[in-house]
Amino acid sequence: MKFIIRNGFSCLVIFCILLFTACKEESLTISNDPKNFSEIFDAFWTDMNTNYVYWDVDTTDWDAIHQKYKPIFAQLDINNFSDKIKSVQYFDEMTKDLIDGHYHISFSNSTISSFSVYPSFERKQKSANFHYPFSYFSIDTTYLDQNYSLGSDKNNSYNENPLTVLSGTIDEHIIFVSCSNFSLLKSYYSTIPNQVQNSLNHFFDLLSNITDNTKGIIIDVRGNQGGDIGDLNFFIGKFIDKPLHFGYTQAKSNNGRLDYTPWIKAFVNPEPNAKAIKIPIVVLADMSSASLSEAVVMAIKSLPNGIFIGENTWGATGPIAENKVYNDGQFIVANFLSVLTSSCKFKYLDNKVYEGKGFPPDISVPFNSIEIINGKDSQLERAIEVIQRK
Amino acid sequence: MKYLFFIFLAIFIINLCTAQSAIGINTGYTYNHLNTDISNRALTENTNKGGYGFGLQIKHEIKTRLYLQTGIYLLQKNYSFNRIDDYIGIYETFNNSYIQIPLNIQFKAFKIKRVTFIISTGVYGAYWFYSKVYGTTPNIFDTTQEVGNDGEITQNLTVANFGEKYKFNSLIDNRFEYGFDTGLQLDYKVNSKYSIFLDSNYYQSLTDQQKKYMINQVSKTNQTLCISIGCLFKFSTK
């Protein structure tokens, strides 16, 4: 104590020196132009750490990945072709358990540009009930009344398949609509006339002329892998007359792996002059229904008259936006790879995140290839049966 | 740092029984900067925020020009991340409330008539007891569309407001904070018992606001300026 009293002023000086020398900051160090595999790994690991939105629900131990793969990447030579192939294998191993259904790595480096990493697809392929997307248009037209409208827009393609829309009625009292993917707005407002406009107008006419004899509506998004988010209002907005709350989104808020914004309500907004549809609305979806198709399924399920029939959806429920919108999601490691990943987590009204698992149907009707070969669509038949019973 | 704080606390308590003392209250304004790295986050600024502070302070004269000073303070250490350019209007603000105990040595530098100039330095310990987060964010599932004459579609994201009590996460939030404290005080002696003062203190946290829960973690530390006014009542415990 005496020491402090005798040396009071000296103590003050020492504390001041300590104060101004103690401010240490640990900062982010990401190379914008990685020159070797060690820098590529650091950039990839750090960008994943800050941009991936599912860390709080994903079981992948990202620190363990760092400890295991950092020394492995340090051994690779960026100028060696076989090392580049090995790196693809390592990226595949590191990300194989990520739950994000959108997650996809494409390689921009010319020698490995034919390779890609798609964890959710690899997992689905191994599942017992896996099937590739199937186009039901040719079968489903046999269930429709003669005045159906089937139209495509060859100027608006997804995975090299033109957008196709089928609309019509079943037994004159059930309205049916189906689309191959969601870029309806683009075709509908295109200045180049296309058949999708006819098919959509046919569907909108049927909707606006619902009578007491109309028993229900079937929306078919089987095999539909999503698309433009604007289609959600354009399409589902025809069924509602006030904003429809169907879930919540959450984005990253800072660089910490577990830094998140609060949950924000997700809405579908009604289209101008839309009326609330009170009759049963059945949505058909299957394991290939992904992304915006899953948003459509969950929006329909949020309606008191909505029913979901088919299979568990893909499980890519998080929306995609440019990285700068939320400062998270998709990113690029310069001159080597680009990562597509969700910009937000999505949870349904029941507070559950269905990413990676898929949204479950109310009535499960599995894909049956044998029946399909014989021209029978048991999922559609079940939807018709449910509506007729209501 | 934690041990240094408790050593000073013990010295202070020993002195409490034998010294001439003063007790006072003060209130004022805090201005906080979160020292962290957000250089990778596009169109985002780390913005300092103001807040409030209240305090009950006790000081003991241990020699003619030397005091030990402590107290209990309620301080806000607020900060905000604001988007700029195309994203202006989007922000996230954290209002963080701390209960803080400083342990300072005060040195009476000089005196002009009734005004005494005091410099102080020391350590503090604080507990982060409440936090509120509020702001606005793009809402990707609440959009409007505009269709141009050429059929081009422009998608506009609406902005959602949020505001809620922050739910502390025991895995990541480090609610105990320790650091250095330095300040200047102008003390105006009203009479032999009472004085009023203007106090300015700078608090430099030495602890990260987050526990170490991941590799390559970017640190977050508070740097807080507090300016307050108050009054002191002098009494003797001898």
Image (cartoon, rainbow, N blue to C red):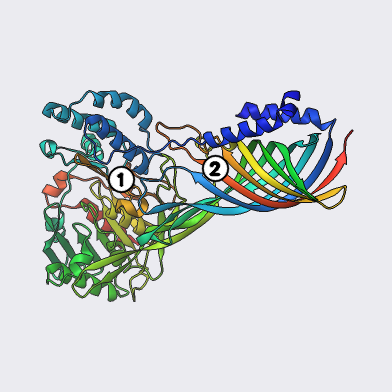
**Mark identifier at residue B222:** 2
Return the chain for callout 1.
A
Give the crowd class for mark 2: few <14, some 14-19, many >=20 residues within 10 Å: many
* CB-based contact (under 8 Å), mark 1 and mark 2: no
Image spot of residue B173 (x, y percent) = 53, 38
Which amino acid lies under the numbered mark 1 shown in the image of this protein?
Gly
Rendering coords of residue A273 (x, y %): 34, 76
Q: Which chain carries label 2?
A: B
Cα–Cα gap, marks 1 and 2:
40 Å
Residue A33 versus residue B90: which sits nearer the camera? A33
At 31% from the left and 37% from the top, the residue drawn is A98
Report the side of A263 relative to A6 (left or right).
left
Q: What element carries label 2?
A: strand
Name the residue nearer the viewer: A205 or A212: A205
Q: Where is residue A52 in the image (x, y as percent from the top left)?
A: 34, 42
Tag shown at residue B231: none
Amino acid type of disc 2?
Answer: Asn
Q: Residue at x 68, y 41 (%)?
A: B119
Residue at x 31%, y 50% (from the top left corner): A323
In the image, A163: left or right of A30? left
Which of label 1 and label 2 is nearer to you? 2
The reply, left or right, for residue B16 in relation to residue B228 is: right
Asked whether residue A122 appears in the rendered view, the answer is yes
Vertical placement of B216 versus A54: above or below? above
Query: Quick one: label 1, few (<14), some, or many (20+) residues within 10 Å?
Result: many
The disc at residue A315 is: 1
Which of the image's four quarters has the C terminus of chain B? top right
Residue situated in front as seen by the camera: B93 or B84: B84
Looking at the picture, does residue B56 appear above or below residue A176? above
Which of the 4 quarters of the picture holds residue B136?
A: bottom left
**In front here: A205 or A31?**
A31
